[in-house]
Image: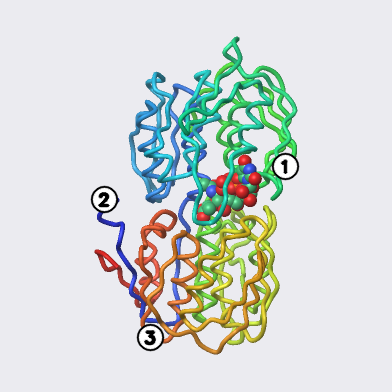
């Protein structure tokens, strides 16, 4: 992995208009891997994860785990196996210096509290995609008997005097539905709690199912993961385990949109097509063909061909919790809809402010009209290359896609946002025939 400070201001220069064609292998999921890694804090035995993607956010999580006494051996990336072992449980403080670089550090809270009886985790602050409170995480842990205070910007959590959390009924519904990382935190904490925990309004995202699989392999007793009610019967201790990380549905969906926007054809291996049904549905409505080429392989690791029609139809799309259309693909789909033949309507129901890409797409000639959490995208015949920048991972991905389709040169500044969530994106796109290069240095 490149040194962070050096990578900070790199940019992508894209000469648009090339049809993408070829094969891509989908990497392990970032958003599955982060809570899986934090789950290593639940035991002092080794936890081995295969296919952890080599990304900046993963490096940040490794840095955090290192501070929390977790030893690391092995390799990141496809074919690699990373082994984590919580060898020293004396420091349970996730400091602001790390949490501010990555909100997912909050995943350490539930596991540390459950195993060590106490945890101190800096409260994550605001973020480019809007207000992101953690009240539901805290409500859930309190329901299990934790005492929680705030001191100096840190969340201080303690288990009851017995040292062990106590199972109970936990409701995780908030104004926008459930919470993915909040469910991960409570699920992890409940595995070591005394008695039965019932999580109602649990997140149904595939990343939660993947976490439950690892925890079950470690000896946890869990039913219902993937549904809104998860039942956990606490055990006294957990063992080590080996686990292969779920493929990244958002990376797969992004490359589907790349094929579509360049009128191309991409075959994807290791594609979690069963986790992408809402995206497939919207893409097919636009006029993109998504076909499974295998019939026998597991639908979570399928081979899928994506082919675009010349004419893209406008659609309505609303982001929702899984199995609805994912917010993490909204910007990429919007880039595609900029070139559709008519008016599309995009409504964001998870992060209503997540529209950093809209003004930047306008700089490329897109016609987008935003009102609150809805954007009407009035399709244009062509986009024009321009220098653009977005301070959010998926917004940046949307701009790269727009650049691939645009006439002329697009410069996407500050690609460190992309490096947080896409492994070697420019190399993957080059292999598919895109003219894209990374330029190091300031923007
Ligand atoms: C996860 O974030 C993902 N991050 C996000 O992906 C993703 O966009 C999001 O889930 C939604 O799918 C990781 O997995 C590391 P939430 P998370 O708690 O868990 C509200 C990316 O680009 N809420 O499910 O933090 C919240 O404001 C990232 O890869 C509360 O009100 O999201 C939002 O409206 C960005 N109180 C909604 O719930 C809480 O305590 C869903 O957020 C927690 C959340």
Circle 2 sits in a helix, a strand or a loop, which is it? loop
- Please say whether residue 181 is visible from this viewpoint: yes
- Kindly identify which residue carries mark 2: 3
Residue occupying image coordinates x 65% and y 76%? 376
Distance of label 3 from label 2 (alpha carbons):
31 Å
Q: Position of residue 271 (x, y in %)?
A: 54, 59
The answer to whether 284 is drawn above or below residue 423 in the figure is below
Proximity of marks 1 and 2: CB atoms separated by less than 8 Å:
no
| Cα separation between marks 3 and 1 | 47 Å
Q: Work out which residue is located at the far bottom of the displayed protein and give it.
A: 381
In terms of image quadrants, where is residue 71? Answer: top left
Residue assigned mark 3: 408
Dot 3, crowdedness within 10 Å: few (<14), some or many (≥20)?
some
Residue at the image point whose x is 70% and y is 72% from the top: 316
Q: Is mark 1 within 8 Å of ligand 1?
A: no
Judged left or right of residue 69, residue 188 is right
Q: Secondary structure at mark 3?
A: loop
- Per the rendering, the mark at residue 173 is 1
Please say whether residue 205 is visible from this viewpoint. Answer: no
Checking the image for residue 53, the label placed there is: none
* Disc with the residue nearer the chain's start (3 vs 2): 2
Q: Residues within 10 Å of mark 2 (few under 14, many from 20)?
A: few
- Measuring from the top left, give residue 25's x and y in whole percent: 45, 60
């Amino acid at each position: 992995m490149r040194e962070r400070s050096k990578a900070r201001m790199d940019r992508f220069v894209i000469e648009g208009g090339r049809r993408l064609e070829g094969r891509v292998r989908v990497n392990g999921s970032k958003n599955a891997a982060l809570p899986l890694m934090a789950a290593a804090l639940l035991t002092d035995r080794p936890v081995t994860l295969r296919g952890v993607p080599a990304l900046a956010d993963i490096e940040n999580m490794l840095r955090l785990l290192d501070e929390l006494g977790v030893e690391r051996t092995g390799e990141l990336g496809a074919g690699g196996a990373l082994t984590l072992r919580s060898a020293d449980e004396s420091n349970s403080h996730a400091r602001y210096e790390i949490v501010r670089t990555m909100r997912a550090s909050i995943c350490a809270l539930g596991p540390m509290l459950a195993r060590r009886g106490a945890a101190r985790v800096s409260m994550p602050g605001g973020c480019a995609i809007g207000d992101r409170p953690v009240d539901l995480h805290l409500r859930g842990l309190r329901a299990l008997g934790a005492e929680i205070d705030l001191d100096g910007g840190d969340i201080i959590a303690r288990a009851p005097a017995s040292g062990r959390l106590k199972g109970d009924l936990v409701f995780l519904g908030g104004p926008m539905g459930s919470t993915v990382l909040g469910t991960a935190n409570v699920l992890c904490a409940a595995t070591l709690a005394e008695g039965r925990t019932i999580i109602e309004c649990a997140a149904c995202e595939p990343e939660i199912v993947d976490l439950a699989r690892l925890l079950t392999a470690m000896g946890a007793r869990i039913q219902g993961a993937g549904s809104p009610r998860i039942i956990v019967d606490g055990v006294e201790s957990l063992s080590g385990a080996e686990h292969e990380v779920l493929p990244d549905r958002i990376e797969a969906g992004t490359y589907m949109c790349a094929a579509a926007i360049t009128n191309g054809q991409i075959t994807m291996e290791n594609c979690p097509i069963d986790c992408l049904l809402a995206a497939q549905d919207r893409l097919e409505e636009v006029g993109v063909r998504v076909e499974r080429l295998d019939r026998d392989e597991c639908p979570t690791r399928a081979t899928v061909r994506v082919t675009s029609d010349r004419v893209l139809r406008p659609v309505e799309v609303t982001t929702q919790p899984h199995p609805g259309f994912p917010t993490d693909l909204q910007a990429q789909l919007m880039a595609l809809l900029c070139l559709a033949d008519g008016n599309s309507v995009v409504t964001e129901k998870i992060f209503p402010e997540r529209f950093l890409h809209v003004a930047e797409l306008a700089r490329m000639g897109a016609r987008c009209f935003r009102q609150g959490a809805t954007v009407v995208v009035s399709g244009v015949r062509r986009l024009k290359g321009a220098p653009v920048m977005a301070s959010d991972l998926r917004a940046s991905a949307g701009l790269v896609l727009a650049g691939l389709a645009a006439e002329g040169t697009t410069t996407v500044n500050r690609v460190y946002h992309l490096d947080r969530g896409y492994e070697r994106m420019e190399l993957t796109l080059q292999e598919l025939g895109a003219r894209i290069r990374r330029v190091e240095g300031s923007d």
